[in-house]
Amino acid sequence: MNQLPDLFVARRWNTLDGKTLDIAVTGSIAAVESPRFLRSLRRLGAEVVPWLSKGGKQFISETSLDWASGGKSVVQSFSGAASHIATHDALIIAPASANTLSKISLGIADSPITTLAASYLGCSKPVMVLPTMHNSLANSPIIAQNLARLRDQGVIFLAARHGEGKAKFPSPQSLADRVSYQLNRSRWGEQRPAVVLTMGSTRGYIDAIRYVSNYSSGRLGSLIAEELFRRGLDTIVIAGPCKYRPRVFSQLIGVETNEEMLAAAVAACQKPHTAGVFAAAVLDYIPQAKISGKISSKHPSLAVELKSASKIISACQPSSGIKVGFKLEVASPGQDLPASALSLAEGYCRREHLSFFVVNFWQDLSELSHKALFFAPTSSGAVEPCGFGGSKRAIATVIANHIEGTFLARSS
C-alpha cells in the first residue's frame, strides 16, 4: 500500500495557485494556530515561507512551522542572502503582536520581519496583518494611532475572532479564504462584480409555531459561496434556515419565508455588475394564510389550504445577465435521465433567461454526496449539455468557473 509523505497536503481548491506567500508569526499565544493556517493556505495552492520572530518562538517552535510549510523557516536573524527583501507575492503577519505592528507603522526595521514589511510596502505589494491582542492594548491611545497609521499606509487588516475581551485567531480555513479573496479581488478593478446567492430552505407558517418547509442542508450553497469569495468576487448570500452557512462572505442576509427571500434577492439583484445563483430549496406552495397565535392541539384533524408561491428566480434579473438556476427532480423507474433533463433544461433556460442550469435527481444526492447534470444556452439559442458533476465540491467549482469566466471574457 502506497503511503503519502507526512508533509503532503491535499489541494482542495486552486485559488492561490502560483502564489508564494511570506507568513510571519510574532509573539502571541495565537501563534499555536499558525501551523493549521499554513496548511490551509497550501490546500488552496499557495507555497508558504514561514518567518518566526523572537517573541513567536516563546509560543511555537521552528520545527512546527517547517513541518506545516513543507520547507524551512526564516528565524530571527539577518543573513547575507538578503531574504528580508520582498520577492514574493504577499506578506501575511498572523498573529501580529502590538509590538511588531507599532514598529512597522513607525518604520522601525530592527528585525527581519519588520524590515521585510518595510520592503513589501516600499514595493507596493500586499501586506496583511491579523492583530491578536487584549482589547486594552488595541484601545491604548498610542497603539490605536499606530494601527490607524498602518491602515493609512495601505496595510490590509484581516478580521480576528473576538471574545473574552480579546482579538483571537479565527478559523485557519476562513483566514486562508480571506487571504485568497484579498489577493484575487484586485484583478476585478473598481467595478468588482458581486454574486447574489440564495441558499437553504424557506418556511411557510401555518401559525406562530408550525410551518411547512423543504429540506436543504445548505452544504452546496455554502461551498459555492465560499469558492466565489475566494476568487475575489463579492458575495451577497441570502440564506434561509439550514444546517450549514458559508464561513466567509461579503454579506449574509438571514431570511425565513418566501416573501423575505424574494424581497432581499430582488433588491440585491438591482445593484450593478451582479450575477445570480439561485440554489435555495424554495417552497412552491405556502399556506393560504397564517393563523394568529397557536392552533389548539385538541382538534381531531387539521386542514391547511396551500396556495402557489411567487417564483423568486422569475422575479430576479441580475444586471449582468449571468443567472444560474437549479431544479430537483425525482426520477421514475426506467426514465431516461439525460433526455428528461435536457427537455427540462430547455424549458427552464428560456423561461427564466438562464445562462447556466443544474439538474439534480433526488436519488443521486445526500447531505455529503451529490450528482448533477449541467446545461447552458449556446450562441444560437439552443440549450446543450455541458458536463456532469459528481460531488458538491465539483458542482461548486463548475458554477464558479462559469461566473468567473463569463465576467472575465466580457472585460477582456
Image (spheres, helix red, strand yellow):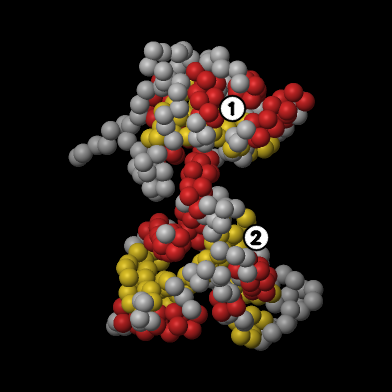
Residue under the point 51% across and 49% down:
185
Dot 2 corresponds to which residue?
253
Task: Relative to 76, say whether 171 is above or below.
Answer: below
**Mark 1: secondary structure:** strand
Q: In this view, does 248 lie to the left or right of 372?
A: right
Q: Quadrant of the N terminus?
A: top left
**Mark 2: secondary structure:** strand
Kindly report the distance in space between the C-alpha atoms of the residues bearing marks 2 and 1: 31 Å
Dot 1 corresponds to which residue?
96
Find residue 378 and report its image quarter. bottom left
Q: How crowded is mark 2: few (under 14 residues within 10 Å), some or many (20 or more)?
A: some
Q: Residues within 10 Å of mark 1 (few under 14, many from 20)?
A: many
Give the amino acid type for the residue marked by disc 1 in the picture: Ala
- Label 2 vs label 1, nearer the camera: 1
Q: Which sits earlier in the primary sequence, circle 2 or circle 1?
A: 1
Residue under the point 35% across and 81% down:
380
Residue 272 seen by the camera: yes
Residue under the point 60% across and 78% down:
315
Q: Where is residue 118 in the image (x, y as percent from the top left)?
A: 54, 24
Task: Relative to 344, say whether 250 is above or below.
Answer: above
